[in-house]
Image (spheres, rainbow, N blue to C red):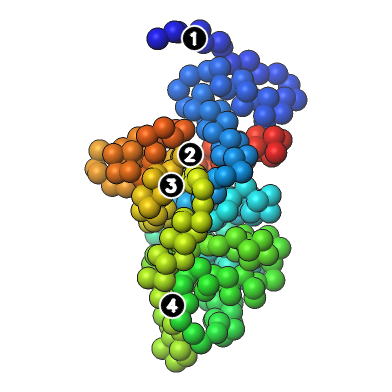
Amino acid sequence: MKLKKMKQVNIKPNMTVNELLIEMKEGGFTCRKVALATDIFEEMINDKECKTFLGLAGALVPGGMRKILKIMIDQELVDCIVTTGANISHDLMETSGGSHYHGREDINDMKLKEMEVSRIFSTLVPYDAFAKFETLAQKVLETIPNRQMSTREFIYELGKHIDDRDSFVRAAYEKNIPIFSPSFADSMLGVQSWLFSQTTPLNINVLRDHSEFTEIIYESNKIGALFLGGGVPKHFIMNGSQLHNGLSYAIQITMDRPEHGGVSGASVKEAISWGKVASGAKWINIMADVTLVLPLLISGILSRV
């Protein structure tokens, strides 16, 4: 093995994000990994034979990533999205006029309860924001056709009736980029959909997701994925990738660890043993907060595409 000498990362005033990433590649540890991940993502989206899948887990909208997700869709950096219902719910909350606020993780939660404010780590959400979301959700649900739908069809119908240019759900509708949410029942939107279904027919069949998602997989020459967190979105994409000899590109950004055996912390390398990632794939694991890495990665990519 030929050794490559490491250089020390150099920074200077007014350098661009892309210039910073190029310097970060000369460093070590997570610094270098973020830069290498940007290179892999660039290659993935420039590979005309490859479809890029995006897995969205965790509280990314409360973490401030909503506009970045919309930009990724607007710039067609992804071809298909699999997300938790929570990210869709918080996207609709912003659409409804509800807001997320800055807080602290060491704040008095009993005091927050008295103030009718919920906490998501260091982000605060007043109860009235949930009320605004619920009002909008019920209004939009009234527009949903009475027929059996996959979650992809359901979310497409939602996007059609959202009048908010900052919404990533609306952006996906406009770009005709499919969004699947196989676990959306476990979310605020899922609860509102259940409540709505008590008086009005609403037929969402999550098993149809497999049929539609598999069709997208089979129509792809190559597939790659950017996993923002793990959970159901990662597992759903990985299961589909087994039908296509595995992912040719894979980037995982997560804070979860592998020792407990859960999919959220399992390394991309481990997925090779399952046939979910191709043996010759270009892949990288980054143990870091998505809200730190994603702005750097996408800012760098926008200056290259």
Q: CA distance from mark 2 to mark 4?
A: 32 Å
Kindly identify the residue that appears in the image at 51 percent across and 24 percent down.
32
| Label total for image | 4
Would you call the spot at circle 1 few (<14 residues within 10 Å), some (14-19), or many (20 or more)?
few
Residue 249 numbered mark, or none: 2
Residue drawn at x 69%, y 71% is 163
Q: Which is more toward the observer, 204 or 21? A: 204
The first of marks 4 and 1 along the sequence is 1
Residue depth check, mark 4 versus mark 3: number of the one nearer the observer: 4
Counting residues from the N terminus, which is met first, the one under dot 2 or under dot 4? 4
Q: Earlier in the sequence, mark 4 or mark 3?
A: 4
What amino acid is found at the position of numbered circle 4 in the picture? Ile
User: How far, Cα to Cα, is label 3 from label 1?
Assistant: 31 Å
Rendering quarter of residue 97? bottom right
Please name the residue shown 65% across and 75% down the image. 161
Badge 3 element: loop
Instruction: Name the spot of residue 12 as percent of width and height, x first.
Output: 70, 18
Residue indicated by mark 4: 204
Does residue 252 sit above or below 131 in this rendering?
Answer: above
Q: Quadrant of the C terminus?
A: top right
- Pointers 2 and 3 in contact (CB under 8 A)? no
Q: Is residue 224 left or right of residue 78?
A: left
- Nearer mark to the viewer, of 2 and 1: 2
Which element is circle 4 on?
A: loop
Report the front residue among 90 and 240: 240
Q: Secondary structure at mark 1?
A: loop
In three-dimensional space, the C-alpha distance between marks 4 and 1, rounded to whole angstroms, equals 54 Å
Quarter holding residue 110 = bottom left
In the rendered view, does 78 fall on the left or right side of 105? Answer: right
